[in-house]
Image (tube, rainbow, N blue to C red):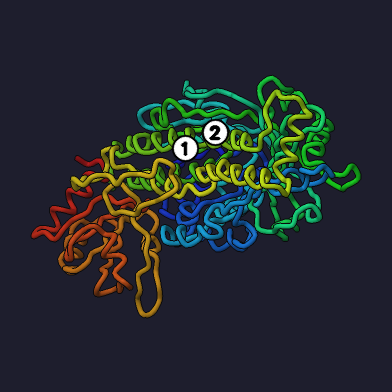
Amino acid sequence: MRERHTPVLIVGGGGSGLAASIFLSDMGIESILVERHFTTSPQPKAHIINGRTMEILARHGLAEEIYRQGSPPEKSSAMVWLTSLGGDAPYDRQVLHRADAYGGGQSAVRYAAACGHRHGNLGQRWLEPLLRAHAEERDPSTVLFGHETIGLVQDDEGVLATVRDRAAGEFHHVRADYLIAADGGKTIGPALGVEMVGTPTLLEWVNLHVHADFSPFMAHDDAIVNRVCSLDEETGRFLHCGVVPMGPKRWGRHSEAWTLMFARPPGSAKGSELDDAAVEHLVRKTLKLPGDHPMRIESISRWPVEGTVADRFSVGRVFLAGDAAHRHPPSGALGLNTGVHDVHNLCWKLAAVLTGTAPAALLNSYAAERRPVARQVVERALYSLFNQIAMTGGTGVVEGAAPAWNRSQYAALFADTADGRTRRAVLREYFDTNRITTEHLGLEMGYDYADAGYVLSDGTERPEADPLGLEYRQCARPGHRMPHTWLSRAGRLTATHELIEPGRFLLITSGRAGEWREAADRHGYEMVVVDVGSEFADPGGAWANLRGHEDGGALLVRPDGFVAGRFDPITDPWSALAQGFRTALAAD
């Protein structure tokens, strides 16, 4: 068999794998990506791209295109709970609750203070082709769809994969220095004995991709997600269904495409046991759609929901990312985002090792830094899922009660009486707990790597975190994401994260720029050096309040935007930087 060599082999052409291909290319590192399917996913899948992810993608020239293709912010700023889309009972076609979501509405100011990029909203069905086009533009011969990895061996020198071209029926070998398993955990992890630890399959999820006009059933036009909690007239039980606008040309209630999502709880027929006709019947029943209302189903997917984290994020020269490393419910829109953060953390380290800038020991930091984040994400997604179900307890509807009782309770909720107003006020208290799902800025931005051992500690204490994960307190403590604020040069505002270039460290000084620049030049690392004072102005003194060091000091920032070292004014900048680089690059 013919053999190709590449520094990095990427297995999996979903969001994480394609992002890894782009990141590596932009750092001058060749890779080969193999994906067993012939096309990107036809399913809409994940769609909410949080500000931190957009901040990362912007550094690779992707953000503006995602914003152009996705929904405008005014069409994706709220989460709305509805009792149904149709129906004529007293409790049908009512709004249970609405709340600002994912940086929309009144939360926009708080989100904008933390990040220079707003959320994006574009389903993976449309996002993945965009990423694939960018990956192929950088090197079209190395993005191989319709190719599957059918064998893998590794030794001290690298990885040897046997790859089959599914169209031609031909086999070849790929020899790689390192492999990124971004295949959803379908092949590489199990082959290497990696186990998923945590909560195994707890229910089954069913997603429908449909084309329909739901605008007659909705008065609002700004929901990024609609959640229907309808009452089954016969059983008196709640039926739940997410109704998510997917554009792709019109958005809000006038979207042409939608994702309809529902779960099959334990004790009920599994999604895999329901044929397509049964799925459509159940969805129409849940939404209370008129029987003659047009709804064309393009596809139905069924998948198990679990809350697990891989027991290892690496095996030898193989590194797991995305769903291969962690799996959880879609609550909170954390899956795609966390996968992109995985490969963003990993790829700059692979580049540093492959170019000889850092020893291979640096790659040990990937699991040390990312696995705790994955555990936190999985825990929150699981809790959010069950909290969304528990919120409906505030309606007065009781699981197992007589259907007539539950119908009366639901009707009383919307009555124009003192009792009805009291019930609605209590219900708002229940629904307010959903902030942990829709406004978790602290969870999106607030994770840090300070305890992993690969940043230079300055002895300061970690800021107390909001246990709900709602609030995000920016700080420049080593191990934390570099604070966002706006600097000014020649009248143009620049976000601090815009100063980062792929694969390069950033040194931000605040005076004594010449000494710090000379020290940086002597080290010879690929880095960007900027001075706030002589090169950039600090409007309103925001950076001075966030940087956490005195005038004349500096901040050393890793290529992934996390602070590697923080230095007060010192007599020997070269030695300070040397210590910071040794720690950040595992060169001690």
Q: Residue furthest left?
A: 571
Q: Which residue is mark 2?
A: 328
Which quadrant holds residue 566? bottom left
Give the camera-side residue of 490 and 159: 490
Total numbered circles:
2
The residue positioned 81% from the left and 32% from the top of the image is: 233
Q: Is residue 579 above or below residue 187?
A: below
Which residue is the site of mark 1?
377
Locate residue 571, reporting x and y percent.
8, 60
Which three-letter amino acid code belongs to the residue tagged 2? His
**Left or right of 386 on screen, residue 375:** left
Q: Can residue 42 be seen in this snapshot?
A: no
Is residue 454 toward the left or the right of residue 282 in the image? left
Number of other residues with Cα within 10 Å of mark 1, as a class: few under 14, some 14 to 19, many 20 or more = many
Spatial distance from mark 2 to mark 1, Cα to Cα?
Answer: 8 Å
Q: Residue furthest right?
A: 292
- Residue 140 spot, x, y in % from top left: 57, 52
Name, please, the residue furthest toward the front: 418
Which quadrant is home to the N terminus? top right
> Residue at (44%, 31%) from the top-left corner?
159
At x 48%, y 42%, the residue is 338
Name the foreground residue: 164 vs 55: 55
Q: Are marks 2 and 1 in contact (CB under 8 Å)?
A: yes
Q: Nearer the viewer, residue 98 or 552?
A: 98
